[in-house]
Image: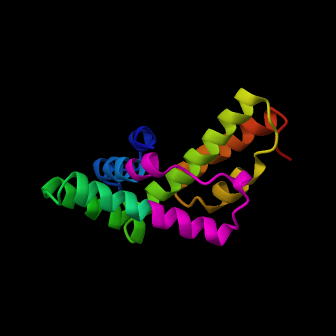
């Protein structure tokens, strides 16, 4: 996601802050991971569990590992900014997260030769709001159509 942020040409965004938001977001996700659809957990419960696990991971980083140092406080502030989704940078990074999920699903389709990942695209791409990220998503959808994976 941080590399995708660096690829953006939107001069209204603070790209440095976007990169930091991406890193902090991915830091927690890297520790927690995702709950896969095959686990059969209902969507509302999945969202609750993931949010709880991410919050616990951030608490671990900020308080246990970094002992609420100045760096830990910066990380916590960035985490809260992303979670609250009140800044244009946080909203942009959320769109990057949505796009990256679809991009990863596309890679799995290519690698594994599977055609069963449409749900990842349906749950992420329509929710992208940033114009440049939306154009990347459109390009991805065109590529999938050319591979015969989308109506």
- Of residue 47 and residue 129, the one placed in the foreground of this image is 47
Residue 17 seen by the camera: yes
- The colouring scheme, among rainbow, by chain, secondary structure or one colour, is rainbow
Q: Residue at x 70, y 55 (%)?
A: 39
Magenta highlight: main SS: helix
Residue pictured at 44% horizontal, 45% vertical: 30
Asked if residue 74 can be seen in this view, the reply is no
Residue found farthest to the top: 111
Q: Is residue 126 above or below residue 117?
A: below
| Corner quadrant of residue 40 | bottom right
Indicate the quadrant containing the N terminus: top left, top right, bottom left or bottom right.
Answer: top left
Residue 84 place in picture, x, y as percent = 40, 71
Foreground: 131 or 65? 65
Height in image: 105 above or below 90? Answer: above
In this rendered view, identify the residue nearer to me: 64 or 105.
Answer: 64
121 lies left or right of 49: right
Residue 91, position as x, y percentages in the image: 45, 62
As for residue 18 lying within the magenta part, the answer is: no
Q: Nearer the viewer, residue 113 or 9?
A: 113
Q: Position of residue 147 (x, y in %)?
A: 80, 32
Range of magenta residues: 27-53
Residue 140: percent from the left, percent from the top? 67, 40
Q: Is 45 inside the magenta-drawn segment?
A: yes
- Residue at (67, 41) in percent of width and height: 105
Q: Quadrant of residue 5?
A: top left
Residue lying at 43% horizontally and 39% vertically, measured from the top left: 7
């Amino acid at each position: 996601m941080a590399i995708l942020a660096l690829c953006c040409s939107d001069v209204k965004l603070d790209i440095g802050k976007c990169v930091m938001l991406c890193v902090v977001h991915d830091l927690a996700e890297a520790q927690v991971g995702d709950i896969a659809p095959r686990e059969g957990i209902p969507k509302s419960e999945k969202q609750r569990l993931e949010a709880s696990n991410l919050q616990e991971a951030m608490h671990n980083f900020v308080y246990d590992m970094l002992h609420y140092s100045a760096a830990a406080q910066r990380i916590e502030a960035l985490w809260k900014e992303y979670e609250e989704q009140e800044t244009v940078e946080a909203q942009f990074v959320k769109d990057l997260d949505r796009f990256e999920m679809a991009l990863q699903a596309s890679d799995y389709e290519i690698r594994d030769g599977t055609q069963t990942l449409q749900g990842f695209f349906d749950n992420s791409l329509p929710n992208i709001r940033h114009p440049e990220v939306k154009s990347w998503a459109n390009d991805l959808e065109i590529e999938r159509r050319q591979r015969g994976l989308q109506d």
